[in-house]
């Protein structure tokens, strides 16, 4: 690739996140005459790739390994053949970050939703009752991906009472330590400037349940109706599922946004670090427990249980922490024989403790 063509590529792809580091990564493929591009949409073995020559349709047959985490996904930077019918994606560049969840499959598979993301924007509707456990689940995956999470509370105009809205924001902030929480009304424009400033720096993925207002938020950030939107149902305040694919879109104020379909299930996938960051206050308390392997259930000298008793730590947070840790442990154990053995050993240990406690409660048995 000549210096003039490299400059042309840089100027054409810069709005989509191309930088000198990506150019260095791509150099070996440029020497082969391949074109750099970013995947803006994937659909049944094919993908749309934005290149310096425009948006191309390419086949992903050369990059379809058995491992579902290594398939081409929206947000990937790829090397595309310069011509041919069909064109083929030859490879993708090493990912800086990847947002992964577990599938509903019984085969313990992960599913990659977006790659090379800087901000994970979790959309939560204020038009329905808050599910803080689900928010924590999204945040665990977001932290694990390597992206910075942001919680956007959509449809804030449907909660006109300022005191109620403030309490809802505080509840989410308690469940999201270290994460910006922004109430937004796409209809009135409230809070949009804050979100626009966040997503202007890099690549953001928009996540949330069906009807959370993601597409409405995406349109507001784009300044035009690019994503289809359906009206909110009057009966329960929920929107309808409209987005069916993951689409990468350049924002007028800078940065790019990946809009995703509503996620009905959000299973953890090897997200132990992410869970720890979501519940950082519990992890900090655990360092003060008497025993280093304290399970925070009934052990003496447990600082976590003491914090629950004093009201410093909401009991709901501890229950959610335990639940996500157990779920993540089960997922990891399906592919880790050593961990499975450790879990079985722990079950036996707890069973023995339980039996000993029951025998002590019954007292000595008389022999006949």
Image (cartoon, rainbow, N blue to C red):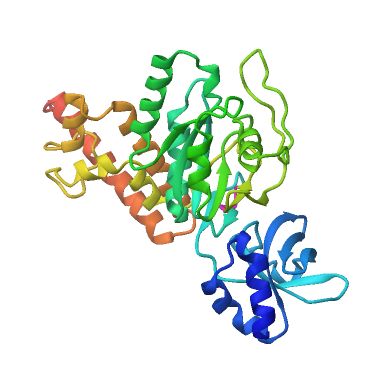
Q: Is residue 308 left or right of residue 247?
A: left
Relative to the observer, which residue lies in front, 7 or 360?
7
Majority secondary structure of the magenta segment? loop
Residue 41, image quadrant: bottom right
**How many marks do you count on the picture?**
0
Residue at 65%, 65% (x, y): give it.
Answer: 13
Q: Nearer the viewer, residue 131 or 305?
A: 131
**Does residue 67 appear in this view?**
no
Residue 66: % across, % down: 65, 65
Residue 92 position within the rendered picture, expressed as x and y whole percent measured from the top left: 63, 70
Task: Answer with the quarter of the image where residue 53 lies.
Answer: bottom right
Q: Residue at x 42, y 50 (%)?
A: 143
Of 327 and 145, which appears nearest the observer?
145
Residue 107 magenta: yes
Report the residue at 39% width, 49% height from top: 274
Magenta region, residue range: 106-110
Foreground: 349 or 168?
168
Q: Is residue 335 above or below residue 5?
A: above
Rendered residue at 24%/35% (across/down): 297
């Amino acid at each position: 690739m000549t210096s003039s063509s490299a400059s042309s590529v840089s100027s054409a792809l810069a709005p989509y996140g191309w930088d000198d580091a990506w150019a260095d990564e791509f150099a070996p493929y440029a020497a082969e005459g391949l074109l750099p591009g970013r995947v803006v949409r994937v659909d049944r073995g094919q993908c749309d790739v934005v290149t310096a020559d425009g948006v191309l349709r390419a086949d992903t047959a050369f990059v379809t390994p058995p491992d579902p985490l290594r398939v081409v996904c929206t947000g990937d930077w790829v090397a595309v053949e310069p011509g041919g019918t069909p064109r083929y994606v030859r490879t993708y560049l090493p990912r800086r970050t990847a947002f992964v969840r577990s599938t509903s499959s019984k085969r313990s598979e992960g599913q990659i939703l977006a790659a090379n993301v800087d901000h994970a924007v979790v959309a939560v509707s204020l038009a329905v009752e808050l599910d803080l456990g689900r928010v924590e689940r999204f945040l665990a995956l977001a932290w694990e991906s390597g992206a910075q999470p942001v919680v956007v509370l959509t449809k804030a105009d449907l909660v006109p009472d300022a005191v109620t809205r403030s309490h809802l924001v505080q509840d989410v902030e308690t469940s999201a330590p270290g994460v910006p929480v922004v109430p937004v009304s796409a209809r009135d424009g409230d809070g949009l400037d804050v979100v626009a400033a966040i997503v202007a720096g890099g690549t953001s993925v928009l996540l949330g349940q069906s009807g959370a207002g993601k597409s409405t938020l995406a349109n507001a950030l784009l300044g035009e109706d690019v994503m289809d939107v359906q009206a909110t149902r009057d009966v329960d305040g929920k929107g309808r599922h409209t987005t069916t694919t993951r689409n990468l879109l350049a924002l007028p104020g800078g940065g790019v946004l990946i809009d995703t379909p509503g996620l009905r299930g959000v299973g953890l996938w090897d997200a132990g670090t992410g869970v720890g960051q979501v519940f950082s206050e519990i992890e900090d308390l655990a360092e003060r427990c008497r025993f280093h392997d304290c399970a925070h259930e009934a052990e003496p000298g447990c600082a976590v249980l003491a914090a629950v008793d004093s009201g410093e730590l909401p009991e709901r947070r501890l229950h959610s922490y335990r639940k996500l840790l157990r779920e993540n442990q089960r997922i990891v154990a399906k592919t880790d024989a050593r961990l499975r053995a450790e879990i079985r050993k722990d079950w036996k240990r707890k069973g023995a403790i339980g039996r000993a406690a029951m025998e002590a409660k019954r007292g000595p048995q008389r022999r006949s």
